[in-house]
Image (spheres, rainbow, N blue to C red):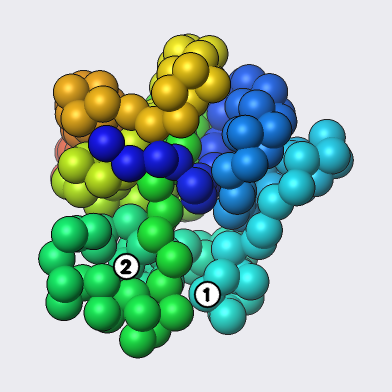
Amino acid sequence: MMKVKRALLSVSDKTGIVELGKALANLGIEIISTGGTMRTLKEAGVPVMAVQDVTGFPEMMDGRVKTLHPKIHGAILAVRDNPSHVQDMKNHGITPIDLVVVNLYPFQQTIAKPGVTLAEAIENIDIGGPCMVRASAKNNKYVAIVTNPAKYGEIIDILKKDGEFTDAYRLELAREAFQHTAQYDTAIAAYLSEQVEKGAAD
């Protein structure tokens, strides 16, 4: 097991995120965040570092590009006991991220709105979020991925007690994360299939 020292928080659903952020900060865990999540945390007095201060690049293209960077994904995907990975992190100034808290753009809620356009639906397809979720879930031996706000209380309790997560717990979180992205992608595919059929009918 490894102590949690650095966390990345980037959520569409802000439920419980301030309480989680405060708990992490009180435990001495450094927090990195993006956009609206970062503003929410800052307004609540939670110390937080902007992703752009980690990557050296500003969020761009209306927020479409912010976390898709080696200093984020390298920090998530590095195998901590692989000497070449450790050397790559050292060479490129990459600090490991141990906890990733992400939930995705509200695609399902968007397409449920009356009169929503295809363009509006497309804009609510998350890209960076699923990439971080999948990367963290793949590297669950070293990284804990949390996609469900209902887990925050449990996460806080574990970190207060132990400061780290067991391998079994991180594996369970990874399973939940892959299920989360699978359902998300299935909803997108189903919606786009409907749009294709409508176009064919026209």
What is the x, y in percent for residue 145? 35, 36
Q: Residue at (75%, 47%) from the top-left corner?
A: 47
Q: Compare residues 190 and 10 and report the one nearer the observer.
A: 10
Q: How many marks?
A: 2
Q: Residue at (67%, 58%) from the top-left corner?
A: 49
The residue tagged with tag 1: helix, strand or loop? helix
Q: Compare residues 167 and 56 and report the one nearer the observer.
A: 167
Residue type (three-letter) at the residue carrying disc 1: Thr
Query: Which callout, 1 or 2, points at the residue further toward the start of the chain?
Result: 1
User: The C terminus lies in which quarter of the figure?
Assistant: top left
Q: Mark 1 touching mark 2, by CB under 8 A?
A: no
What is the x, y in percent for residue 164? 39, 31
Picture quadrant where residue 99 is located: top left
What is the x, y in percent for residue 95? 44, 66
What is the x, y in percent for residue 38? 69, 48
Can residue 88 be seen in the rendering of this structure? yes
Residue 168 vs 46, above or below: the answer is above
Residue marked by disc 2: 74
Residue type (three-letter) at the residue carrying disc 2: Gly
Instruction: Determine crowd level at label 1: few under 14, some 14-19, many 20+ residues with C-alpha closer than 10 A.
Output: some
Residue marked by disc 1: 55
Q: CA distance from mark 1 to mark 2?
A: 11 Å
Describe residue 74's horizontal placement relative to residue 52 as left or right: left
